[in-house]
Image: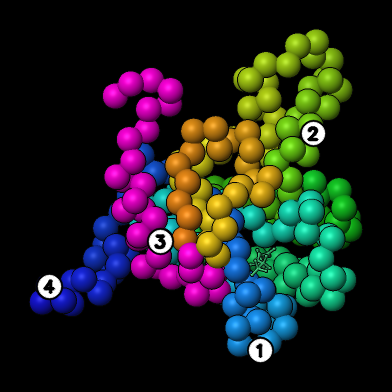
Amino acid sequence: MSLFKKNTTMGDRGETVDDRLKHIAFIMDGNGRWARRRGMPREFGHSHGAATFKKIGRYCEKIGIRYMTVYAFSTENWKRPQKEVDEIMRIFYEYIEDCMIEMKTDNAHFRFIGNLSIFSPELRAKMEKADRETVDKPFTLNIAVNYGGREEIANACNRLIAEGKTQITEENINSHLYTTPCPDPDLIVRTGGEYRTSNFLLWQSAYSEFYFSKTLWPDYSAKDVDEAVAAFYERKRRYGGVV
Ligand code: FPP
């Protein structure tokens, strides 16, 4: 019996997180290596990565997480070989098409964050439609595309200048981020064994807990989420104070 319990996940047991863990974010790294290890092109890893992303999103929602943000494509990822960029974009477009269908039954509020001006008006209209029509759903899913943390902060400042603000404050930057009005991430997980933030949620991560997993993203599972969640609950968050 205890062995059986050990092999179940929080989700299987009907356990949920509490208010300390409202927002989880993922740097979904390791798709390329996962594919290479199988003698396949890197793009093969991205399509498996997209399936993992859907699965992990559903799991996070199931265990009561309210906000999830994923780093799908950075402002720097355009430097990759054109074939790989094209395939990631193809997967992404396909995902948006799926959203248009799944949004009716899904519990997610789909939000696409980043500098979206690079995408065609048609695609942006679809992103906006998915966002608008799911706005009342309980689980917020931020999908960061053409996203860079530095660009996000510069963009917030430029919008403030355009609004005629003469002083930049933490509060007014906070209210002009792509993730606004979501709370800052409580936990940021990076898969794939690297230990860096790669320009992800720079402003929002000031007091986030970080968890680094060696698992390559396409292999990432509910059990891995449980491990990260358990590690999060071991942390003492002091926000610069004393506890
Ligand atoms: C990092 O792995 C992954 C990416 C840059 C792309 C992530 C894209 C997806 C998971 C698919 C599309 C997403 C959505 C939202 C449908 P890497 O390529 O850097 O892997 P490596 O470190 O092993 O080379």
Distance between the alpha carbons at the discs numbered 4 and 1? 39 Å
Mark 1: secondary structure? loop
Q: Label 1 is placed on what type of residue?
A: Gly
Please name whichever residue, 107 or 83, is drawn nearer the observer in this view of the structure: 83
Disc nearer the start of the sequence (2/4)? 4
Residue 155 circle label: 2
Farthest residue to the top: give it: 166
Q: Label 3 is placed on what type of residue?
A: Val
Disc nearer the start of the sequence (3/1)? 1
Mark 3: secondary structure? helix
Answer whether labels 1 and 2 touch (C-beta < 8 Å).
no
Image height of 156 relative to 228, above or below: above
Q: Label 2 is placed on what type of residue?
A: Asn
Image height of 15 relative to 242, above or below: below
Would you name the residue on which mark 1 appears? 39
Q: Is mark 2 within 8 Å of ligand 1?
A: no
Image quadrant in which the C terminus is located: top left
Disc nearer the start of the sequence (3/2)? 2
Distance between the alpha carbons at the discs numbered 3 and 1? 27 Å
Q: Is residue 210 magenta?
A: no
Disc nearer the start of the sequence (4/1)? 4
Mark 4: secondary structure? helix
Place of residue 95 in the rendered image (x, y in percent of width and height, measured from the top left) = 68, 69
Identify the residue at image location x=86%, y=22%: 162
Identify the residue at image location x=63%, y=20%: 170
Identify the residue at image location x=43%, y=58%: 61
Distance between the alpha carbons at the discs numbered 3 and 4? 21 Å
Which range of residues does the magenta coloring cover? 214-243
Q: Is mark 4 within 8 Å of ligand 1?
A: no
Residue 225 circle label: 3
